[in-house]
Image (tube, helix red, strand yellow):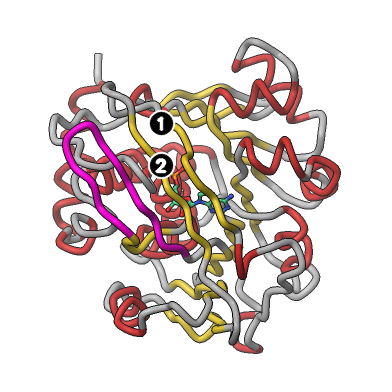
Amino acid sequence: MPLLVLGSVAYDTIQTPFDRRDRILGGSGVYAACAASFFTDVNLVGVVGEDWRQSDTRFIEQFGVNTQGLETRKGAKTLYWSGKYFNNMNDRETLEIELNVMGENWDPIVPPSYQDVPFVLLANGSPSCHLALLEKVKTPKLVIADTMDFYINNMKDNLLKLMKKIDGLILNDSEVKLLTGSPNCISAGKAILEMGPKFVVVKKGEHGALYISPEEIYIVPAFPTENVVDPTGAGDSFVGALMGCLAKTGIEDTSKIKNALASAAVTAAFCCEGFSLEKLKTVSREQIEERLAALRKMCSF
Ligand code: AMP
């Protein structure tokens, strides 16, 4: 079944201990939509400014992503983010963030053909924008939202409102603690279940992810890769592949969620193996299947 992805469409400047790239294609919506496209039909909703390169729209379309919902605003600039990775290539600091066209008053446009889409991914972005989008889709079967420290610190009221309207929340280990005030990922995850979502996925970077629902706790490791070039977008690719896979298989039982979490881990690892979406662009469905089989072997005991 088709998936709608709302998220940022951005230009990023990335510094790693080994290399640097300026104003390359990024954004939570871009990574999530392209990663999801390995599994299902994807409809992207986002906004860019006058500095947007049309070649980047074509690049996203080459993944098979429908970009009819990508709005271009005159007189505005595309979201810009700049980050620097520490030597461990896992931790990073944000050097600059200019929300620009994605500032708080952006009201996402949902083309009529997207309004009945049963699966909705609210990739990392402003919770007010997420709420506005939910007003414009009819009766989605599954809604997952991703968030980050920036929104927990600056837009917590709207985030709390959003949490009452979604099925799943995904965030990283430091963010789950920041949101709940709990120092432990499991108790923080359980506290989030009291705030609305039916399940929580806690991303732990190179240490994998935790799925927490009232019924069970499940862990998925990260796919081990030696070739980490740029981890930017790994979290977005993870949630994109997770939702793409669920849109394809359905969500009838938790085995579907476990399978989707493994696909998400594999896709996120591919994302880290190149700057921007360079590596994901070269990956085939068969390579994803091969790594899934390898991951299954690595985890059996
Ligand atoms: P990740 O590495 O998965 O956390 O995602 C990094 C991506 O998120 C980058 O491509 C950025 O353009 C994008 N990003 C950074 N800050 C924000 C923000 N405040 N809102 C939306 N997207 C953001």
Q: Where does the magenta region start and end?
A: 10-22
Amino acid type, label 1: Arg
Can you tell which quarter of the image residue 292 is in?
A: top left
- What x and y, as percent, mark residue 227? 14, 35
> In this rendering, is residue 70 above or below 251?
below
Along the line of sight, which residue is nearer the eye, 46 or 13? 13
276 left or right of 138 in image:
left
> Distance between the Cα atoms at labels 2 and 1?
7 Å
Can you tell which quarter of the image residue 222 is in?
A: top left
* Mark 2 residue crowding within 10 angstroms, few (<14) / some (14–19) / many (20+): some
Q: Looking at mark 2, is its residue's CB closer than 8 Å to ligand 1?
A: yes
Q: Which residue is found at the position 39% from the left and 48% from the top?
A: 233
Q: Which residue is found at the position 36% from the left and 58% from the top?
A: 35
Q: Looking at mark 1, is its residue's CB closer than 8 Å to ligand 1?
A: yes
Marks 2 and 1: CB-CB under 8 Å? Answer: yes
**Residue position for label 1:** 92
**Residue position for label 2:** 83
- Determine whether the residue tagged by mark 1 lies in a helix, strand or loop: strand
Main secondary structure found in the magenta portion:
strand
Amino acid type, label 2: Gly
